[in-house]
C-alpha cells in the first residue's frame, strides 16, 4: 500500500490533465478507507466497553461474595491484570492509529487537489497571456496562441 500511496500523492507535472481526472477517484478511495477504519474502531470500542462493564461487574461480584471491601483503584488494577482486557485495549490503540494514518492520507489528497487547482489555474493563465509585436511604425499587434488578435498604434 505504501508504494501506491506515494504514487497516488505524487503529481505528474507532465500530465496534469490525467492527474485532475484521477484525483476524485483517488480521494474517494482513501475517504472510503477512512470511513471503514472509523467503523471498525467504533465497533471495537463498543465491544471493549461491553467487555469492560462485564469484567467490572465480575470483579465487584467476586469481592461481594468473599465479603471484601475493594476500592475503585483495586477494581481497576484487577481489570488491568486480565489479559483479554489488555488485548482488547491494545487493539483499540492500534485501530486508533490506523484511523489517524488514513486521515493523514485523506488530508494529503486534499492538499494534492489544492495543488492541482493551482497548477491548472497557472497553466490557463499562461496560455491566455499571449504577446505583442511592434512594427517599425510603432503599431503593436497582439497574438494569442499564434493568432493575430488586434493591431493598435501608440
Image: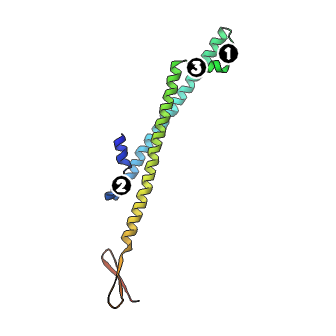
Residue visible at 69% across and 13% down in the picture: 69
What is the spatial separation of the Cα atoms under label 1 and label 3, in whole angstroms? 13 Å
Q: Kindly report which numbered mark, 2 or 1, lies closer to the viewer in this rendering.
A: 1
**Looking at the picture, does residue 104 appear above or below residue 136?**
above
- Please give the residue where the numbered disc 1 appears in the rendered image: 70
Cα separation between marks 2 and 1? 63 Å
- Left of 19 or right of it: where is 63? right
Q: Is residue 109 left or right of residue 13?
A: right
Q: Position of residue 57 (x, y in %)?
A: 62, 18
Vertical position of residue 43 compared to residue 51: above or below: below
Secondary structure of residue under mark 1: loop
Q: Quadrant of residue 19?
A: bottom left
Residue underneath mark 3:
79
Screen quadrant of the C terminus: bottom left
Label 2 or label 3, whichever lies nearer to me, is 3
Color style of the picture: rainbow
Residue at image mark 2:
19
**Residue at the image position 36 percent from the left and 70 percent from the top:** 127
In three-dimensional space, the C-alpha distance between marks 2 and 3, rounded to whole angstroms, equals 52 Å
Observer-nearest residue: 4 or 26? 4
Q: Locate residue 113, reporting x and y percent.
A: 43, 54
Amino acid at each position: 500500500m505504501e508504494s501506491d500511496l506515494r504514487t497516488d500523492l505524487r503529481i505528474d507535472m507532465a500530465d496534469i490533465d490525467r492527474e485532475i481526472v484521477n484525483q476524485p477517484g483517488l480521494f474517494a478511495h482513501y475517504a472510503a478507507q477512512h470511513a471503514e477504519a472509523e467503523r471498525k474502531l467504533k465497533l471495537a470500542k463498543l465491544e471493549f466497553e461491553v467487555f469492560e462493564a462485564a469484567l467490572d461487574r465480575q470483579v465487584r461480584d467476586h469481592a461481594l461474595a468473599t465479603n471484601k471491601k475493594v476500592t475503585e483503584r483495586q477494581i481497576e488494577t484487577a481489570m488491568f491484570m486480565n489479559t483479554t482486557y489488555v488485548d482488547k485495549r491494545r487493539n483499540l490503540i492500534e485501530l486508533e492509529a490506523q484511523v489517524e494514518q488514513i486521515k493523514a492520507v485523506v488530508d494529503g489528497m486534499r492538499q494534492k487537489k489544492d495543488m492541482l487547482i493551482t497548477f491548472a489555474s497557472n497553466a490557463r493563465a499562461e496560455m491566455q497571456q499571449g504577446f505583442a509585436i511592434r512594427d517599425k511604425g510603432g503599431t503593436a499587434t497582439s497574438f494569442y496562441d499564434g493568432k493575430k488578435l488586434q493591431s493598435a498604434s501608440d
